Image (cartoon, grey):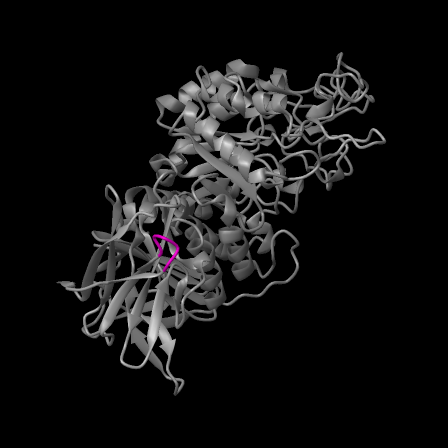
Amino acid sequence: MLALLLGYLAKNKKGKYMTDFRFHPQSQVIQQQDSYLITLYTAINHNYHKVFVRVEPDHEEWLMEMTKPSIEGNWLKWQINIPVSPHSPLTLYCFKFLSKDNQCYLHAAGESSRLPQKHFHFRINSQAKPPEWAKQQVFYQIFPERFANGNPSLTPNKDNYSYQEDGRKIVQKQWGEPVAKSHSGTGATEFYGGDLIGIEQKLDYLQELGITALYLNPIFCSPSNHKYDCTNYFKVEPHFGGDEALISLSENMKSRGMKLMLDAVVNHTSNQHHWMDYYQQHQGGAYHNQDSLFKDWYHFDESGNYWSWKGVETLPKLNFANVEVQQAIYEGEQSVLKHWLKPPFSIDAWRFDVIHMLGEHNSAQNNAHYVAKFRESIKQTNSEAYMIGEHFAEATQWLQGDQEDAAMNYYGFNQPIVAFLAGVDVPRYVPLKLNAADLATWLAEARGSIPFANQLAQYNLLDSHDTPRFSHLVNESEELTKIAATMLLTYIGVPSIYYGDEVGLTGANDPDCRRCFPWDEKQWKHALLKHYRQLISLRKQRSELQQGDLISLLESDDVWVFMRWLPEQHSIVVINRGESQELDLNLTHLQNQVPYKVFDSSEELVADKDGKLALSLAAQSSMVLISQ
């Protein structure tokens, strides 16, 4: 990541704009035995007489002067070794510039005239980083019950399958029929027959799209179609094909070089789980037995009522203060988290549902302790496993390296993109208007509060099983949907496509966003599918899109231009949500003037002798320029 760097605009006292240039490429930090070699680029004709990097090795300010820069293209290159923090896994730093009559700081969220809060200092965690493979992936999220029916004989039958032991029958539907309007009706009890066999049968389609990794919503035993009410953590739902289907899928994916992430729902169980046994299907459950071995696995009040997720009676909350719960979920060698990471399943990653809510008794008490323990358990079993958490709000505290590798990036990607392109917030969907400068600031602040390694691993998404489809929010505008896809596949972090988005599948809020995948190609938006395929291919070919810094080049009302940068190559991304316009992009401060190829065309563009690149922007469009 980087901090608002190329052609940075700062107002002087007369209200005019002056152009300055300061850029710290976090992608180029080199870890040494007890120090980090860091690099700073500035304009050759800068106006400061001293340049410092500011660190606090003993909680006290230490200004280390940077001297003797070298010339590299159109830039001055400054380098210095800073000490690894001796008292914390996190090493924090920022840059200070002194001119004759003023000072300025460069930090992870931009620039300021005063010392920034530590929240926005550049940060490196030397002890805990996400796996390298994660940033190379293009994920595809699948809601298993709605993706593909590979074995119709496994489909739940309303004559022999009850949602609950109170006798409520399920609703059996034909593939593609409309889904229920809400969960208060039959939203959780409608079954179409999707299964793991169907997913395996569609791996060729997914690879042709360019997908390299799958995230599956819960697949363990559960009475509902969504499976967020688990009744057995150690058994794959028989209607999905059971353990054998998962083994087959995992082995097939590994033979193709694909990664597999499963959904861990360990904040709560189903009230039908034998630990709770609300309907007395088993013996010894906590609900009907005061002497149950599982009584303290949940939190009961004095009246005998149990605490549940958001008051939903079917989802009793686990009590992690109980040692047996710890052993069952993460501590024991046969615990849930370790079981599925080991052969023959050998999954590559865990996604944790509502991870911020779990804790002791009826609260999230000691949450950080347990999330860190989850990480420890996972990494001990597979040091290369990827661990992400679900967070609709800011997740900074979980993303400092010692807990999660990444978050489902609602706050730092989904919400600002939806606000900018659709004009509403997530998850309330009331009006929220942003211009491009607001968008860039929101994104920069979200990036700037976490280590660069975690920025690259952030799980970016436009929509999911919990939100309306992005296309629904923009009234199925193919132009705006294409812009969003461009953002998803070029922005810093790991992109994830919600099943069907690439062919134009739409839907309102949950459960309507969980429609069946339309395998009839006549229903597909083929131009949108082509756009996704080309963008995915580009991302996989260009290393700067996987691991490069991000530089904001231009921010106006409707247009945002940013660069993904590595020393050897870069890409420029142009986003225009408004009317068609002509744009002169100032590239004066680029390290070297190079020709650009316009992605998805044969057109080449070159800046003029003054460093101006002339662009013609179509209305509601995006453009990617790749350096040659």
Q: Picture coordinates of residue 82 (x, y %)?
A: 27, 53
Q: Picture coordinates of residue 528 (x, y %)?
A: 46, 47
Q: Is residue 82 left or right of residue 176?
A: left
Q: Picture coordinates of residue 314 (x, y %)?
A: 75, 30
Question: Against 383, is 434 above or below?
Answer: below
Q: Which residues are magenta?
A: 56-60
User: Which quarter of the figure has residue 256?
Assistant: top left
Residue closer to the observer: 538 or 425: 425
Say how many tags the image has: 0
Residue closer to the observer: 346 or 488: 346
Question: Against 231, is 578 above or below?
Answer: below
Classify the position of the N terminus by image quarter.
bottom left
**Which residue: 45% across, 50% down?**
485
The answer to whether residue 588 shows anywhere in this view is no
Classify the position of the C terminus by image quarter.
bottom left
Q: Is residue 217 left or right of residue 7?
A: right
Judged from this view, the residue extending furthest toward the top is 283
Q: Is residue 230 magenta?
A: no
Q: Picture coordinates of residue 495 (x, y %)?
A: 43, 44
The answer to whether residue 283 shows anywhere in this view is yes
Magenta region's main secondary structure? loop
Residue closer to the observer: 152 or 380: 380
Judged from this view, the residue extending furthest toward the right is 303
Residue closer to the observer: 112 or 195: 112
**Which residue: 60% across, 63% down?**
432
